Amino acid sequence: EIYTLSLHDALPISLLNKISKPTRLIHAKDDPFMDQNVIPDTQTLPPSVEYQLTEHGGHVGFVGGTLLRPEMWLEKRIPDWLHTYLES
């Protein structure tokens, strides 16, 4: 299921409870494009939606490690999650 919204559409939070396929949402609190108003109430999410809120990550950052040896956290996290579904 794919939902695409323009900046003029309603917030997609209202669509989250309609997702039936396994979905992981990863969101950073310090994302400059998405403020606290788009953080969903996890109690209202369906079992198919796994929501992960991190303190840092910016908009597409999620970089760990050090300045000289950065680690792209998101690039590791997604394959780990997909692996669960690809094996079953």
Image: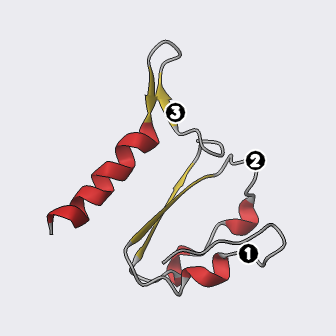
Q: Residue at x 45, y 43 (%)?
A: 74
Q: Residue at x 61, y 82 (%)?
A: 15
Q: Residue at x 43, y 28 (%)?
A: 71
Label tally: 3
Is 78 on the left or on the right of 70, as rendered?
A: left
Mark 2–mark 3 CB contact (< 8 Å): no
- Position of residue 83 relative to residue 69, above or below, is below
Residue occupied by mark 3 = 63
Q: Earlier in the sequence, mark 3 or mark 1?
A: 1
What is the quadrant of the C terminus in the image? bottom left
Viewer-proximal residue, 20 or 50? 20
Is 4 on the left or on the right of 9, as rendered?
A: left
Residue occupied by mark 1 = 11
- Position of residue 28 relative to residue 24, above or below, is above
Viewer-proximal residue, 10 or 49? 10
Is 55 on the left or on the right of 51, as rendered?
A: right
Query: Where residue 75 appears, x then y in whole percent?
Result: 41, 41
Q: Amino acid at mark 3?
A: Val
Query: Where residue 43 appears, x then y in whole percent?
Result: 51, 80
- Residue projecting furthest to the bottom: 18
- In space, the residues marked 1 and 2 are separated at their CA atoms by 16 Å
Is 52 on the left or on the right of 84, as rendered?
A: right
Q: Amino acid at mark 1?
A: Leu
- Residue projecting furthest to the left: 88
